[in-house]
């Protein structure tokens, strides 16, 4: 059986690389407050509850930017989406739903891949009630986490591994686009 491929997708500065590092248990991805630090796909093996999977960190997706760096990042994210089995779509509780989040959610709803909606920066129990706004993205139950603090990561990973038990979709050719 092939190892499931899980890709973290989202706009810049929502905490994708921090989540990647948290899940794999070491600091492999560069974490910085400036957007555009992660440009290429970054792969690492991880496991949860005895289930091994390959995790992919991607750069911040900017759907309408014509900047050369943003275009290159968007191409890398497109490739990662096409080859993945499960998508972790990460959003930021502190900013709420943005137009970019809505655009990405629309694209992800059209993929044939299961999507787990991860609401980062849910640093305490009192903030969890604020995650309900993310139901408006149309991607199911929001999973509240704090990638920095490690809060909610175990529960989110429990939900993630349930996707591994389903019959995986056949991966699309790597060079096709999901735009």
Image (tube, helix red, strand yellow):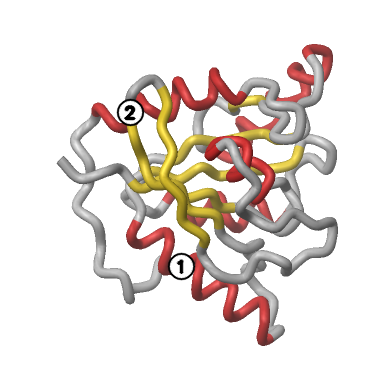
Residue 133: quadrant of the picture:
top right
Residue 132: quadrant of the picture:
top right
For label 2, the residue is 51
Measured as percent of width and height from the top left, residue 67 is found at 71, 84
In the image, which is nearer the foreground, mark 2 or mark 1? 2
Q: Where does the N terminus fall, quadrant-wise?
A: top left
Measured as percent of width and height from the top left, residue 76 is found at 50, 71
Q: Is residue 140 left or right of residue 86?
A: right
Q: Work out which residue is located at the far front of the displayed protein and give it.
A: 26
Q: Classify 10 Å Cα crowding around label 2: few (below 14), some (14-19), many (20 and above).
A: few
Q: Classify 10 Å Cα crowding around label 1: few (below 14), some (14-19), many (20 and above).
A: many
Circle 2: element type = strand
Q: Is residue 116 left or right of residue 95?
A: left
Sequence-wise, the earlier of marks 2 and 1 is 2
The residue depicted at 41 percent of the width and 32 percent of the height is 47
The residue depicted at 45 percent of the width and 45 percent of the height is 87
Q: Work out which residue is located at the far top of the displayed protein and give it.
A: 125
**Distance (Cα) linking label 2 and label 1:** 26 Å
Q: Nearer the viewer, residue 29 or 68?
A: 29
For label 1, the residue is 78
């Amino acid at each position: 059986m092939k190892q499931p491929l899980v890709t973290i997708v989202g706009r810049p500065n929502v905490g994708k690389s921090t989540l990647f590092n948290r899940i794999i248990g070491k600091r492999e991805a560069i974490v910085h407050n400036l957007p555009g630090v992660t440009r290429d796909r970054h792969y690492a093996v991880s496991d949860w509850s005895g289930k091994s999977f390959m995790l992919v960190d991607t750069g911040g997706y900017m759907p309408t930017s014509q900047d050369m760096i943003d275009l290159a990042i968007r191409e890398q994210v497109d490739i990662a989406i096409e080859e993945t089995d499960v998508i972790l779509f990460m959003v930021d509780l502190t900013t709420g739903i943005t137009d970019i989040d809505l655009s990405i959610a629309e694209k992800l709803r059209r993929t044939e891949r299961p999507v787990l909606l991860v609401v980062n920066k849910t640093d305490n129990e009192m903030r969890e009630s604020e995650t309900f706004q993310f139901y408006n993205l149309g991607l199911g139950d929001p999973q509240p986490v704090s990638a920095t603090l490690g809060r909610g990561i175990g529960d989110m990973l429990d939900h993630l591994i349930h996707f591994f038990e389903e019959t995986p979709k056949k991966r699309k050719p790597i060079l096709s686009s999901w735009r």
